[in-house]
């Protein structure tokens, strides 16, 4: 166990680390190469990346470091920060090597006042269903009970008792689409300084409900989840400083974890009763509104009809935006299903922008063919799964590019995106973006990098579940957005999946689920 700096110095010694992954249990495992291809920083390289003007790492880590820099002297002790695109369970051996590296770095750092961890919270491993909890618990065992451990979480985190017990403060995002990573990283820094100055440990109250909402119901602009978060923030203010943080996590069903379920975590300055009271109040509100955590989707056939109608309307009439919801790379989808694309092409719909199909081999073939070439574009040429079926279209190469771009709006704003070789193919009336690094199309830069203006298209279709709403808000109001019920690893119809570990009964999978109010004090 590491000794804590005592008494607290003017420059607190704070370790930095994180392993981030949103795991879809139905997707292929995430291996070491997937993480290293995305981002993998150690020691001084981590700190330099966090202080860079644009970065590929989670913005909350950068915000934490920069907020600590701005609020006084401190001694940053960077360990390891790595993450990859949402994928399947992380390979256990790689995860163990990461945790051991973090343990070794913290041990070598000497006395610590605190630790900040950037986490997602919905990771599962090939052998461990709660690796986020394992990481937090092992850090706690190393630094001892007095050091302050603070972590930030995605609001799709699946919260476990071990996670809550091991950390002093867990801070979840408040927005979906995720637009508040910077404020949450800043909050982590500010609150860490307050806790260190007070010398007190906060009180935590935790409730997890037998409620597993589909991700499409977890928007925060409107709806039951938005109301729940708004109530939590209002009530936190009404407690007059007694409450440090209110986190309401919608969970991520596709992790198929025993800790899955909408959860409420309230952290109070020191009053456990205040924390428990508010946690139960919010959980009860969620349960009363459970019937609203269901959403009707648009079928592929209906989407085609809407596209035809939009194409037939004058240019000044509203266009439509489709979410290819069953194949969201941001939730572990392969980014290569073709049902919606095929339907739009076969229907002869014109002025369509479709983004983005993950197919490195096709992008490379387009590059070899060259600008202006006409060829038979073979998508998913190896047909590796039931969703990645091979399909061939006559296509024209209308644009090529390679390398990184910087996001402009929403989730990716100001963040570097490595997309590899990319091509824009024209297939009948549809222009299709093909990329070599699996990403959800949540930013207009995916089209703008080819000189295409989403506002000039009559139909825009994106492989993204919800983050596209912020990226494409300048052109598409909520009334113009349709979530299309396409097959894939992120299909919002949860009844289609064979669950192994998700707690049952759970609403809405089990309509007669009963909840007895109870709260855990941890």
Image: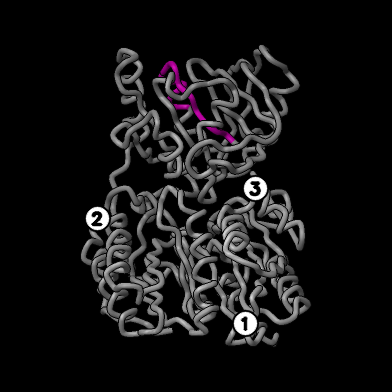
Residue 515 picture location, percent across and down: 27, 75
Mark 2 highlights which residue?
292
Q: In this view, does 471 lie to the left or right of 146?
A: left
Dot 3 falls on a residue whose secondary structure is: loop
Q: Which stretch is magenta? A: 342-357
Residue 109 picture location, percent across and down: 75, 76
What is the C-alpha distance between the residues marked 3 and 1? Answer: 33 Å
Whether 351 is among the magenta residues is yes
Q: Which residue is drawn at 69% across and 57% down?
A: 31
- First in sequence, mark 2 or 1: give its number: 1
Label 2 packing within 10 angstroms: few (<14), some (14-19), many (20+) = some
Q: Quadrant of residue 279?
A: bottom left
Mark 3 highlights which residue?
56
**Tag 2 and tag 1, C-beta contact below 8 Å:** no
Q: Residue at x 51, y 15 (%)?
A: 428
What is the C-alpha distance between the residues marked 2 and 1? Answer: 48 Å
Whether 228 is among the magenta residues is no
Residue 8 - label: 1
């Amino acid at each position: 166990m590491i000794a804590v700096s005592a008494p607290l110095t003017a420059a607190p010694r704070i370790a930095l680390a994180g392993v981030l992954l949103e795991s879809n249990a139905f997707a292929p495992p995430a291996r070491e190469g997937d993480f290293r291809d995305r981002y993998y920083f150690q020691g001084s390289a981590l700190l330099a990346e966090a202080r860079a003007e644009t970065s590929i790492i989670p913005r909350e880590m950068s915000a934490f470091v920069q907020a600590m820099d701005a609020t006084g002297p401190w001694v940053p002790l960077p360990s390891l920060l790595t993450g990859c695109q949402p994928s399947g369970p992380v390979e256990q051996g790689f995860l163990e090597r990461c945790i051991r590296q973090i343990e070794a770095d913290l041990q070598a750092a000497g006395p610590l006042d605190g630790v900040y961890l950037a986490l997602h919270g919905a990771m599962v491993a090939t052998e461990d269903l709660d690796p986020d909890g394992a990481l937090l618990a092992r850090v706690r065992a190393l630094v001892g009970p007095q050091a302050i451990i603070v972590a930030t979480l995605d609001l799709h985190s699946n919260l476990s008792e071990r996670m809550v017990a091991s950390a002093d403060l867990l801070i979840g995002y408040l927005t979906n689409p995720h637009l508040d990573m910077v404020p949450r990283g800043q909050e982590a820094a500010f609150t860490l300084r307050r806790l260190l100055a007070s010398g007190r440990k906060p009180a935590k109250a935790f409730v997890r409900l037998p409620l597993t909402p589909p991700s499409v119901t977890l928007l925060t602009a409107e709806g039951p989840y938005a109301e729940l978060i708004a109530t939590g923030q209002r009530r936190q203010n009404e407690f007059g400083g007694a409450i440090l943080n209110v986190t309401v996590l919608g969970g991520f069903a596709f992790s198929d974890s025993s800790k899955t379920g909408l959860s409420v975590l309230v952290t109070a300055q020191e009053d456990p009763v205040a924390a428990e009271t508010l946690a139960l109040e919010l959980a009860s509100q969620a349960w009363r509104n459970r019937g609203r955590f269901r959403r009707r989707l648009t079928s592929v056939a209906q989407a085609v009809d809407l596209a035809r109608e939009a194409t037939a309307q004058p240019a000044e009439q509203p266009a439509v935006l489709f979410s290819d919801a069953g194949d969201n790379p941001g939730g572990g989808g392969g980014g290569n299903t073709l049902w919606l694309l095929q339907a739009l092409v076969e229907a002869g719909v014109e002025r369509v922008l479709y983004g983005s199909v993950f197919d490195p081999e096709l992008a490379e073939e387009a590059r070899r063919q060259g600008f202006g070439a006409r060829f038979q574009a073979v998508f998913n040429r190896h047909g590796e799964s039931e969703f990645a079926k091979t399909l061939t279209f006559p296509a024209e190469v209308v644009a090529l590019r390679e390398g990184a771009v910087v996001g402009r709006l929403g989730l990716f704003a100001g963040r570097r995106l490595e997309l590899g070789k990319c091509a824009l193919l024209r297939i009948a009336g549809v222009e299709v973006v093909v990329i070599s690094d699996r990403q959800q199309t949540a930013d207009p830069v995916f089209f703008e990098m080819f000189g295409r203006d989403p506002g000039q298209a009559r139909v825009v279709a994106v492989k993204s579940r919800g983050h596209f709403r912020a990226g494409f808000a300048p052109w598409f109001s909520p009334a113009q957005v349709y979530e299309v019920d396409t097959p894939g690893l992120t299909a919002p119809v949860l009844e289609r999946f064979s669950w192994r570990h998700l707690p049952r009964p759970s609403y809405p999978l089990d309509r007669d689920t009963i909840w007895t109010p109870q709260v855990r004090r941890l």
